[in-house]
Amino acid sequence: MAKRVFIAATGQHCGKTTISLSLLHLAAKSGMRIGFMKPFGPKIAVFEGRDVDMDAKLVAKVFGMGDQIEQMSPVVLHKGDTQRILEGIIEPERLLERIGKAFEILDTWCDFLVIEGAGHSGVGSVAGVSNARIAKELDAPVLMVTGAALGSTIDDVSLNLALFREERAEVKILMPNKIIPDKREKTLLYLKTAFKSTGISVLGGYDYSDVLAHPTLLTVSRLLELKLHSSEEQVSRIVHGVQLGAASTQRVVDLLQTSTLLVVTSSRDELLVMLSTLYHMPEYFDKIAGLVITGEAPVSNITQRIIDDCGIPYLRCPARTTAEIFLKLKNFVSKIYAEDEEKIRLVQDLAETGMPFEKIYDHL
């Protein structure tokens, strides 16, 4: 029987997958046979011709666990499945049975099994497979990843705890994540005080990291559903900021920050040429991550040749406005993909120095 943990969260973008990757890395490094499961997958990716949850695909590729993929992602939600469930075409109990069978196989294979939930505790309720119900059915102690702002975190945890308690699933650990470094000690102290009466342990997650919080160029291309024109090395370039190329050429250049993705209309030949040329210079290479070129008007032939010759990564988006693209990028929160090698290496390095694996293991 595997030692198991259910990774829950108070909402999206708390860092469940980062914590899952960390625990798996440390368990594997200690010599354990590791397993991973995303019982209910609302976000579909294709892995070796099979529809699976995107986080199951990530773990399978990072840890070479492709032979377990059928058990790692037993239920994925396809378009229209919600209606089919409500109409009685898909029976929730059959989905729970499928999850249970996958779990039984992994439980015999592994020494340490990470079961990652989806979103907050209630996600999956329409299908009868909420995070809280799955945790109870699989008899898995819960580690709940939370935010790090005091008031909202306490409110969010209290709300999510209610459903776990209703399902009689045991929450053992709260893990505030993305903590502001200079507030870390105070944040953990107050959260431990707030939940002292519950008997739930509070263990600190990671400090906030620009690298983990921000998307790669590959992630941007997936978000915008646009082809990325780049080399294989450039796809992993991390975008730390987004800038609108609306001011004068010199002013845009003066405002450049570290690893900036610039949104520029196709008619701004002088700006496109300038940025492409600067991309070759060491003092500007670190500032320019790439371009998103908007606008229906075609890029002039000579400008396009300069962009191609300079090798600056770019995405071409003629169908949406500059403002729409800019706002979508500014409001986006990054996820980790299997191709994000720099992020994955950082997670593994951080795990070895900052993840309290032994304390977590002892609580399970």
Image (tube, rainbow, N blue to C red):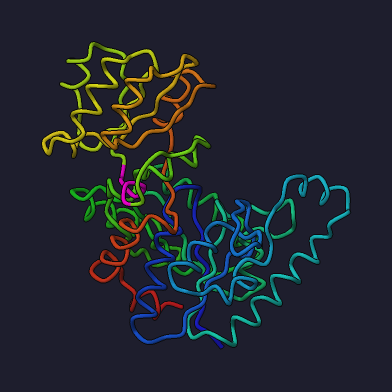
Quadrant containing the N terminus in the rendered view: bottom right
Residue 26 lies, in percent from the top left, at 35, 76
In the rendered image, is residue 149 in sight? no
Q: Is residue 219 above or below residue 70?
A: above
Residue 335 lies, in percent from the top left, at 44, 49
In front here: 210 or 216? 216
First to last magenta residue range: 233-238
Q: Is residue 248 left or right of residue 5?
A: left
In front here: 297 or 96? 297
Q: Is residue 110 above or below residue 145?
A: below
In front here: 352 or 183? 352
Q: Is residue 77 left or right of residue 236?
A: right
- Toward which corner of the image does residue 202 lie, by quadrant? bottom left
Q: Residue at x 58, y 64 (%)?
A: 38
Residue 168: in magenta span: no
Q: Residue at x 21, y 56 (%)?
A: 185
Q: Is residue 305 left or right of residue 98?
A: left
Residue 237: in magenta span: yes
